[in-house]
Amino acid sequence: MATRRLYYDDSFETEFTARVMHCEVLPPDVNAGITGTVWGLLLDRTAFYPTSGGQPHDTGKIGDANVLDVRDEGDEILHLVDRKPSDPDVSCCINWPRRFDHMQQHTGQHLLSAMFLERFGLPTVSFHLGAELCTIDLQGPEPSDEILEGAEHAANRVIFEDRAVNVRYGTADQLSQLGVRKEVDREGILRAIEIESADLQPCGGTHVKRSGQIGLILARRCAKVRQDWRVEFVCGGRAERVARHDFMQLRQVADKLSCSLENVVSAASKAVSERDANFKNARAHLQELAQAEARLALQATPPDSRGFRIFSRVFEGVPSEYLGFFATDFAKTEKTIAVLAADDGSLLFAQHPSAGHDMARLIKHVLEKLGGKGGGTHDFARGKVADPSQRRVALTSAMRMLSEGK
């Protein structure tokens, strides 16, 4: 027996009565976030929307049971609840804030997609209504900021005009003659949503009755996803929350930069330029310091019986790149080897080619014993021990292998 879908004709129906036609115990469904035993109900009629077409399912109550999931089973709609109803005749209610939010997002999507197609020739190929944000994937060239703003502005004009949003029924041919935005190859009577003088689109989802109920659309950003362009947007209550959050973030940035909201971009650009200049100067000074210390270390390291100068040290309080500067300068002299570590467990082994060892092989053997990752060339290798407290052990191990000629 097919379930009568009340939301097809009235998405604002939040309370209804129904009869339980079938009830069965179902196992947990971890993929759906359901870890306990649930009951699957088939009703003769329902206003609960099942997950479909990019729109999530409704929640609410069926008698005393909480609706956890709603699934489209073809002609029937399956309701997953946390307990078995005590009576076959049940009173049901929809979680209205969730439903209305979905109605705002879905109707807003229809309108935004229509504007992208009508104004800029960019068809929508998919839609996702997320818990916080919504997205549509557009086919065609990359939408510029001007296109995003243009589509958003055109959609909001329709919203502010508070046009009627109607449910239409007809065959694919009949809807095609009415100028449907996306034709479908299906037989029988189809349901379509019409936004007066703006859009006509086949859809089984829940929608508002007038465009003004969408509230507002904010098209936020665009990113490449495979062959298409994913546009992130929000509508209605979500747009209000996102706009407030964005403004508060902007105000905090302005406070940090000690400037007005209007000057945030120029002040941020200046701060970035100064940061980059300071970073460049600091890096140059760090390199100079490492080179000076390497030369002192070379003078203080006497050659061993084989004529090698092998220097080993754990550096405290320096960034890992300091090791590279130090080792590069130290290993310029013949028969020199530097075995170094930093606070965070970073390792650097370097040698002058005349030393004749294999630094990549050496660091590999050390990390095989202590755990970690690394690699490099015959003369220069980097790595990092899994446990930074083992950095001194790593250097001791490397020094022992060098003394053994490994």
Image (spheres, helix red, strand yellow):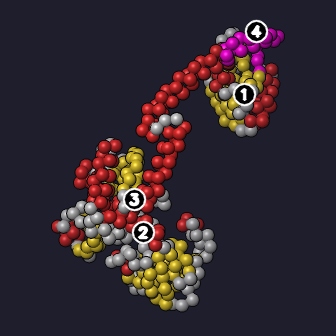
- The residue at which mark 4 appears reads as 299
- The reply to whether discs 3 and 4 touch (Cβ–Cβ < 8 Å) is no
The vertical placement of 189 against 296, above or below, is below
Measured Cα–Cα span from mark 1 to mark 2? 56 Å
Examine the structure image and report whether residue 358 is included in the region drawn in magenta. no
Measured Cα–Cα span from mark 3 to mark 1? 50 Å
Residue furthest to the left:
177
Does residue 379 show up?
no
- Residue 78 vs residue 357: left or right? left
Q: Which of marks 4 and 2 is nearer the N terminus?
A: 2
Q: Give the range drawn in magenta.
A: 289-312
What residue is shown at x 52% (from left), y 25% (from top)? 274
Return the residue nearer the eye: 98 or 329.
Answer: 98
| Dot 4 crowding, Cα within 10 Å, few <14, some 14–19, many 20+ | few
Q: Earlier in the sequence, mark 1 or mark 2?
A: 2
* SS at circle 3: strand
Q: Position of residue 247 (x, y in %)?
A: 46, 48
Q: What residue type is labelled 2?
A: Phe
The answer to which quarter of the image holds residue 356 is top right
- The reply to whether discs 1 and 2 touch (Cβ–Cβ < 8 Å) is no
- The residue at which mark 2 appears reads as 100
Q: Which amino acid does label 3 sit on?
A: Cys
* SS at circle 4: helix
Return the residue nearer the eye: 148 or 46.
Answer: 148
